[in-house]
């Protein structure tokens, strides 16, 4: 694909076949096509009607068991996103479809309140954005994430958020209330301070400087913040670990975490296509270094290693990370959020009996 055919504002440049489909579209004879095989389509927002809203996981690699994703697919277009593969379960591609066919859960707040009001419900931390970003661009119009936070305030329920979108500032009023009761923490994702890297790797996201200001704002209203460096890609942003942690600490982040990129499922082909188009001079080396962190493979499914990697490359990155966190963040940690404040707002009234 030449530069004139590059889909600006998109991460993926291809739409690989859905592995669940027995047939696939292929471009074999370009001269026989009446129209472009792939076009620069506008984003579509597709309503869905789930019967439940809280997802549960027992993965040892996650610090949470419950999560809510108001949206499936993400217009941010981050080329590395592990959630791309889940789009295939909806009948779409993990490539361009993931970025421009967004499934929307309009009844998310209604379903969550139904969960909270069950007599058997036991409160525990809920993560917003366990899979896709709850503050992606369409949230500005739909406000589904805000409606979920309103319930967290109403029921005094603990919540954690991970996002890279500064739209979160809109909800500072709710986050301030939750922070006052030790019911919220936030992870802000930044994986490069270099704008040219961000534009290629995460085409529809806020700049690093804007995200650092978001951290400052969150800290100012009492919300504990983690800097999330995800993912670290050897040979592209791996040299920025120390600078990222220092910048995050200066903005107010009290701790940090990171992952090393892994290219599971369809993401391998999508990422390789992107890599050769954007970094042709180092593509082979980058892929080799990724493999060196994951037992000689780019698709790593082993718990633990799939997140932090192993081998000499991964060990050197982990060493640099630990030294930087100790130096700039004094080995800080996020506080445990309270679970004991949960209540039905109408408890003790006749309405509370139903």
Image (spheres, rainbow, N blue to C red):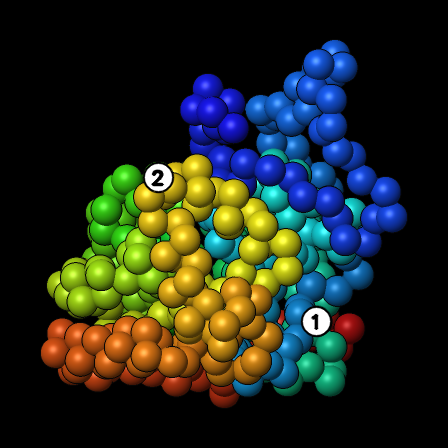
Q: Can residue 304 be seen in this snapshot?
A: yes
Image x and y of residue 270, in percent: 56, 47
82 to the left or right of 54? left
Q: Nearer the viewer, residue 19 or 103?
A: 19
**The C terminus lies in which quarter of the figure?**
bottom right
Q: What is the crowding at mark 1: few (fewer than 14 residues within 10 Å), some, or many (at least 20)?
A: some
First-in-chain label (2 vs 1)? 1
Number of on-image labels: 2
Q: Secondary structure at mark 2?
A: helix
The relative height of residue 262 versus residue 3 in the rendered view (above or below) is: below
Residue located at (62% from left, 23% from top): 39
Q: How many angstroms separate mark 2 from mark 1 (CA)?
A: 39 Å
Judging by the rendered image, the residue that carries numbered circle 1 is 115
Residue at the far right in the pictured view:
22
Image x and y of residue 43, in percent: 60, 31
Q: Nearer the viewer, residue 289 or 258?
A: 289
Image x and y of residue 95, in percent: 61, 44
Judging by the rendered image, the residue that carries numbered circle 2 is 199
The relative height of residue 53 versus residue 314 in the rendered view (above or below) is: above
Front: mark 2 or 1: 2
Q: Are marks 2 and 1 in contact (CB under 8 Å)?
A: no
Q: Can residue 157 be seen in this snapshot?
A: no
Image x and y of residue 280, in percent: 38, 41
Residue located at (68% from left, 51% from top): 87
156 to the left or right of 43? left
Q: Secondary structure at mark 1?
A: helix
Q: What is the crowding at mark 2: few (fewer than 14 residues within 10 Å), some, or many (at least 20)?
A: some
Residue located at (41% from left, 53% from top): 284
Residue located at (32% from left, 79% from top): 312
């Amino acid at each position: 694909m030449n530069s004139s055919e590059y889909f600006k504002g998109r991460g993926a440049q291809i739409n690989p076949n859905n592995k669940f489909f027995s047939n696939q579209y292929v471009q074999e004879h370009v001269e026989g096509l009446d129209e472009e095989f792939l076009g620069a389509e506008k984003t579509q927002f597709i309503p869905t009607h789930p019967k439940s809203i809280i997802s549960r996981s027992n993965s040892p690699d996650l610090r949470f068991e419950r999560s809510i994703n108001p949206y499936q697919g993400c217009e941010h277009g981050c080329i590395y996103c592990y959630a791309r593969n889940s789009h295939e379960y909806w009948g779409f591609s993990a490539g361009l479809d993931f970025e421009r066919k967004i499934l929307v859960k309009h009844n998310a707040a209604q379903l969550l309140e139904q969960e909270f009001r069950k007599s058997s419900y036991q409160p525990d931390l809920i993560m917003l954005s366990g899979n896709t970003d709850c503050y992606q661009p369409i949230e500005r119009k739909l406000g589904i994430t805000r409606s979920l936070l309103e319930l967290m305030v109403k029921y005094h329920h603990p919540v954690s958020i991970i996002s890279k979108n500064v739209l979160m500032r809109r909800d500072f009023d709710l986050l301030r209330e939750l922070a006052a009761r030790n019911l919220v923490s936030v992870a802000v994702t930044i994986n490069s301070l270099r704008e040219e890297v961000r534009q290629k790797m995460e085409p529809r996201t806020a700049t690093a400087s804007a995200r650092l200001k978001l951290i400052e704002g969150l800290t100012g209203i009492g919300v504990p913040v983690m800097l999330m460096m995800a993912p670290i890609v050897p040979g592209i942003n791996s040299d920025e670990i120390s600078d990222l942690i220092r910048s995050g600490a200066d903005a107010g982040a009290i701790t940090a975490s990171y992952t090393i990129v892994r290219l599971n499922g369809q993401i391998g082909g999508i990422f390789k296509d992107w890599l050769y188009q954007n970094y042709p001079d180092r593509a082979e080396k980058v892929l080799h270094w990724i493999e060196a962190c994951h037992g000689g493979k780019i698709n790593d499914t082993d718990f633990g290693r799939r997140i932090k990697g192993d081998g000499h490359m991964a060990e050197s990155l982990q060493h640099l990370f630990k030294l930087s966190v100790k130096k700039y963040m004094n080995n800080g940690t996020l506080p445990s959020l309270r679970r004991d404040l949960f209540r039905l707002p109408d408890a003790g009234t006749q309405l509370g009996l139903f």
